[in-house]
Image (cartoon, rainbow, N blue to C red):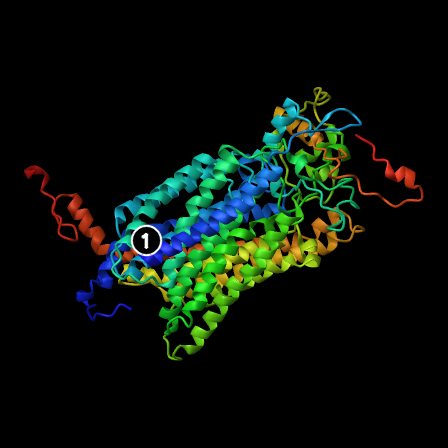
Amino acid sequence: MNQAALIVLGVFAATASSFYGILVVPQAQIGRLDQTKIEETGSYYPAVRPGEAQAGAEVYRANGCVECHTQQVKMKGNGTDFERGWGRRRTIAQDYLLDNPVQLGTVRLGPDLANIGSRQTNAVYHLQHLYNARLTMPGSTMPQYPYLFTKRALAAGEKASEGALPSNTEPGFEVVPRPEALALVAYLRSLNSEAPLYSAPFPLVPTNSTAAAAAPSAK
Amino acid sequence: MGSTTPVSEAEGFVPQEEIDASCRVPVLLAFGSAAKWLVIGLLLGVVAAIKMHAPAFLAHCPWLTYGRVRPAYFDAIVYGFLSQAGIGAALWTLARCGRGRLALPGVASAGGVVWNLGVLVGVLQVLGGQTTGLPWMEFPRQGAAVMAGGYFLMAVSACYTLLHRRKHELYVSQWFILAALFLFPWILSAAYMLGVVDPVRGIMQAVVSAWYANGIQYLWLTPLGLALAYYLLPKLGGAPVYSNQGAAFGFWTLVVFGNWSGLSLLQGGPLPRWMIGVGVASKFVLLLSGVAFAVNWELTRRSAAKTAPRQPAGPFLSFGAWMFVVALFLDAITGVTSLGHKVNLTPYATGVTHLLLFGFVGMVLLAAVYHIVPRLIPAGWSSPGLISAHFGLSLIGTLLLAGSGILGGLSYGGKLADPGVPFLTAVQGLTPFAGMTTLGLLLLLLGGGVFGLHLLLTVVRGTARERAAFCSWCCGCGTLPGGAEKKARAGA
C-alpha cells in the first residue's frame, strides 16, 4: 500500500500546485478587477449590458456561436487583427469583467466579434446575416438560423408587416425576426472593447501628422 | 495468457479465469456503451462537418445547428466513448495486475449505467441549447452531476479492487490508472464549481476551462491510454518493459507538467504574459514524457523475441503508441513564437487534439478492447477480418481527420497572416479541408459501426449458453450458471 500512497500523495501535490498556481493566484491578480472609470467621459467600463443585450448573450451561448467566432483582439505583432480592423487595441482581462459566460473562442472560422458593435451598427444587416449569411456576404460558410425568424407567405400584392426584413431576403415571403433574433442583434451591437484604458492604450499609428495619431478618441 | 496451468494458490493469487469472470459484466457493459457512443458521436460529428461546407444542411432544426451539434459530437466522443472504454479497460487491468477479483462488480455495473445516463442527459442538454459555452465542459451541471455519480460508483469498485489486491507491488499501468482515477473527480468538480455553479468573474472563466480541458486530455485520458499501452506492450510484444525508471520518469513528468500546461491553450489571449509563458514552457517539458514513453516503447520492442505471434490488437497498439509523442510534439512546437502566432486560433489545435484523442487514446483503448474481450468471452471475436477492416478504416479516418485540422490550420493561418488576403477568401480556402474532415469522420463512423456490430455479434454468440439458462430460469424451470435455482412459481 505504501507505493500507492506515494503515488496518491505525489499526484495530489502536483495537482494542488497547479490548482494554486493557475487558478488561485491569477484569481487574486485579475479576478478582483472591478469596473474602471474613464476620465474623458465619466462613464464606467465595462458598462453593464441593457436587458435585451443580456438576453442576446444567452442566445449567443445557446446557439454555440463561440464554436466559430472569437471575442479577443490579439496584440500587435501577433496576427493581423489590427490590419483587419477588428479592434484599435488588444483586449485585456478588464474587457470581460461582466461577461457570463466568457465566450473567448478557440477557433476563428468567422471574423472576431470583440468590436463588432462598433464595426457594424446596422441591425438589419445583422438580422439578414443571421437569416442567411450568403445574402449579405456571398460565399460565406456561416450557418443559417431560419428558426430565429418567422416566415410567412405573402399573398399577391400584400405588403410585409413592420419589422419584417427587406423584401430581397426571401422574395414572396415575409420574414419577421423573433425576440431571440432581436436580442442577439442587440447583444452583437453591444460588443465594443475599444474604451481607452491605462493598461491598454491605443497603439500609436505612425502617420505624417503625429498629433492626429496621438490623441485617442473616447467612444 | 489463457494457459491452463494453475497459478500458485499458495501465493494467494486468484486464477485468471476467475478474475476475468468477475470483470465480465461491468467491463462488457462499459465497452458496449463506448461503442454505442462512438457511433452516435461520430454521426453528430458528420452532421457538423457537412455543415462546414454546406451551411444550409438541416438548417431549420435548432437542435442540429452547428454551434450545438459540434460540441455534442466532441463531448459524446470524450465522455461517451473514450472515457468509458478507458474505465472498462482500467477496471480489468487493475484486477489482473493485482491478481485479485474485481471488487463490487455490481456497483461498477451500476456506475456504468449511471455514467451513460449522464452522458445522454448532457448531450441532449447541449443539443437543446443549454450548453455552458465553456470548451470541453459544455454539459450543464445536471448532466455532469449524473456522470460524476456514475464515476463515483465505478471508482468505489476500482478502489476496493486496489485495496484488496493480492500482489502488492504496483505495475506501471496501476500507477497511471491510480493517477487518472484520483485526478478526474478533482478536475471535474473544481472546474464545474468555479466555472458553472458559482462562476468566477470575467476572464478567469477562460482560465478555468483551459485548466479543465488540458486536465481531461493529459490527466484523465492520456494516463488511461498509457496504462493500457504499458500493459499491452509486454503481452503483445513478448518482452517486459525495458526501463521501469523511464516509465516512472514519464509518469511524474506527465503528472506535474500535464497539470501546469493548461494555460498554453490561451496563447495570444487577454491574459498576463507570465501565465501563458508558464503554460507554454510546461508543454515543452511535457514533451519529455512523450519522448520517454517512445524510447521505452522502441527499446522494449527491439528486445522482444522476433517470433511474438501477431495479435489482432497489434496494429491498433503500434500506431496508437507512436501518436502520443507525435501529438505532444505538434502541440509543443506551437510554443515557438513564429509558428504559434501563425496557427493561433486556427483549426491546427483541433487537428492536434483529434490526433491525441483518436490517434493515441482511441487506438490504444481499441487495442485494449480487442485484447480483453476474448478473455471475457472464451469463444473470442467472431471474425478477425472485421478487426482488420476496423483498423484500416480507423487509420485512414484518423489521419484524414487530424491531417485536415493540422494542414488546414497551417494553410489558413498563412493566409490570415497576410493582411492583404480578405478574411472571406481565407475562410473559403478551408473548404477542401472541411471535405477532408467530413471524409475522415465518415470513415471513422464506418469503422465504428463495424466495431459496434462485431462487439454485439461476439457478445451475443459468446453468451448463448448463459442467455438460454437465464431464459429457462426466468420461466421457473432451470438453474442459472453458478447454480442458483429458482423455485417453481407454484411451489414457492
For label 1, the residue is: B27
User: Quarter of the image containing the N terminus of chain B?
Assistant: bottom left
Circle 1 chain: B
**Whole-percent x, y for residue B54 in the image:** 63, 46
Q: Residue at x 62, y 58 (%)?
A: B406
In this orientation, which residue lies closer to the viewer: B434 or B72? B72
- In the image as oriented, which residue stretches furthest toward the left? B491
Any part of residue A157 in sight = yes
**Whole-percent x, y for residue B181 in the image:** 39, 50
Q: Residue at x 31, y 50 (%)?
A: B159
In this orientation, which residue lies closer to the viewer: B444 or B407? B407
In this orientation, which residue lies closer to the viewer: B153 or B44? B153
Element assignment for label 1: helix
Residue B291 as seen in the image, left or right of residue A195? left
Q: Residues within 10 Å of mark 1 (few under 14, many from 20)?
A: many
Any part of residue B456 in sight = no
Residue B237: quarter of image: bottom left
Q: How many marks?
A: 1
Q: Residue at x 68, y 35 (%)?
A: A95
Residue A205 as seen in the image, left or right of residue A134? right
User: Quarter of the image containing the C terminus of chain B?
Assistant: top left
- In the image as oriented, which residue stretches furthest toward the bottom? B306
**What amino acid is labelled 1 in the image?**
Val
**Whole-percent x, y for residue A42 in the image:** 76, 24
**Whole-percent x, y for residue B329 in the image:** 58, 62
